Amino acid sequence: DWRRVIDNKDIDMVIIGTPDHWHCLQLVAACETGKDVYVEKPLANTMEECDLMVRATRKYNRIVQVGQWQRSDPHWDEAAA
């Protein structure tokens, strides 16, 4: 359950790599509990979700980065072989 990670006081930051319809809820909850966040693209499904996420980031003074892990590049397959 992702909420156990969010509530863990020993964790400083989280990586959100869940399906994008979960991103807004999880990012806002992480910010509320003092976590910095790396969230996978796409950030959100609507502008309203984006606005909620930006407001939470600012309200709780958190660092949030949006990105995309390059898990499909051929060099990862070679490294795993």
Image (cartoon, rainbow, N blue to C red):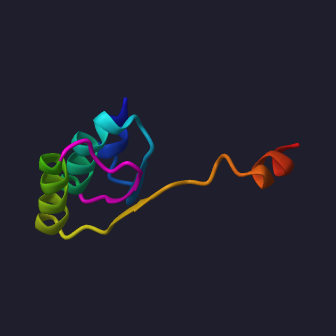
Q: Residue at x 30, y 43 (%)?
A: 23
**45 shown above or below 10:** above
Viewer-proximal residue among 78 and 7 = 78
* Residue 18 spot, x, y in % from top left: 41, 37
* Residue 65 spot, x, y in % from top left: 38, 64
Viewer-proximal residue among 48 and 80 = 48
**74 shown above or below 55:** above
The residue positioned farthest toward the right in the image shown: 81
Q: Is residue 46 left or right of residue 39?
A: left
The image quarter in which residue 58 lies: bottom left
Viewer-proximal residue among 45 and 30 = 45
Q: Is residue 69 left or right of residue 23?
A: right
Residue 11 visible to an observer of this rendering: no
Q: Is residue 15 magenta?
A: no
* Residue 60 spot, x, y in % from top left: 16, 64
The image quarter in which residue 67 lies: bottom left
Q: Residue at x 27, y 49 (%)?
A: 27
Which region shows up in magenta?
Answer: 34-46
* Quadrant location of the N terminus in the rendered image: top left
Q: Is residue 35 magenta?
A: yes
Count of numbered marks: 0
**56 shown above or below 46:** below
Q: Residue at x 23, y 56 (%)?
A: 31
* Residue 25 spot, x, y in % from top left: 22, 40
The image quarter in which residue 80 lies: top right
Q: Residue at x 32, y 51 (%)?
A: 43
Q: Is residue 27 left or right of residue 51?
A: right
Could you tell me what secondary structure mostly forms the magenta stretch? loop
